[in-house]
Amino acid sequence: MITEIEKLTAQDIVKSTNLQHIAIIMDGNRRWAKERNLPSAMGHKKGVDALKAALKACHKFGVKYLTVYAFSTENWNRKPEEVAFLMELLANTIKNELQELHENGVVINFIGDLTKLNPKLQKILYDAMDYTKDNTGVRLQIAFNYGSRDEIVNAVRHIIEKGVKSEDITEDLISKELYTKNIPDPDLLIRTGGEMRVSNYLLWQIAYSEFIVMQEFWPEFDEELLSKAIFEFGHRQRRYGK
């Protein structure tokens, strides 16, 4: 017997559930490459293709916000050559894809401590944000040199620096000091690669997000898998503690 939800499209579910924001932990690039006896770099490059597919699918399905975990504050502990490659990959990807993203109306925002990046890369990222800031399409947040605990600590520091009294500190005030202050919290968190952890990602913001863990590695992610996640989301009952 076909249920009512199975008659719907992903677009229908996005609209009927008011699914606005999807966050993704893009995990499995290196494992995907290792299974194929390829260097890790090939997995990361294929990961860029998967991100482009996810972004196009979000536009098609009517999802307004997409936030992806690209490089954590802990990823500096990887081999120096891999870190250097990831920095170069980000710079080249932005330079190569920026015009098409702009023409498709994408708003690009980088969240994380960008001050730790080299000045040349910082300029590329800030220029991309400035170039796309007035667009009206999907808002893409790329978490780079991002750690949620670090984000929350910085938010508290900013509040203290402003001289806010302890009795005046609220959840809303803290939210306004986070990197994601101008966007709604994620409705759905997807993690690829099968791992069952959140890895210091959007800890404040995902308080009531629905979680979906996929066994597929990130380079395998595409429109079909995003649609599958949206259908799963459509079956969930969001009670917010009620």
Image (cartoon, grey):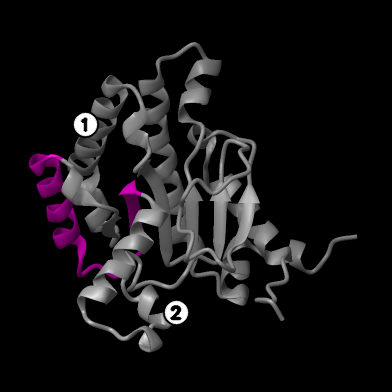
**First to last magenta residue range:** 118-146
**In the displayed image of the protein, which residue is found farthest to the right?**
1
Q: Which of marks 2 and 1 is nearer the N terminus?
A: 1
Of the numbered discs in the image, which one, if any, rests on residue 88? 1
Residue 99 can be seen, yes or no:
no
Q: In the shown orientation, is residue 3 left or right of residue 174?
A: right
**Does the rendering let one see residue 164?**
yes
Tell me if residue 131 is in the magenta stretch. Answer: yes
Local crowd at mark 2 within 10 Å, few (<14), some, or many (≥20)? few
**Quarter of the rendering containing residue 5:** bottom right
Task: Please indicate whether residue 205 sits to the left or right of residue 79 in the image.
Answer: right
Q: Give x and y (percent) for residue 23.
A: 48, 56
Asked which secondary structure carries label 2, the reply is: helix
Distance of mark 2 from mark 1, alpha carbons?
37 Å
x, y percent for residue 228: 65, 51
Residue kind at label 1, given as amino acid type: Glu
Image quadrant for the C terminus?
A: bottom right
Residue under the point 28% across and 62% down: 105
Residue 45 placement, left or right of 26: left
Q: Does the magenta stretch include residue 114?
A: no
Residue placed under numbered mark 2 in the picture:
171
Label 2 amino acid? Glu
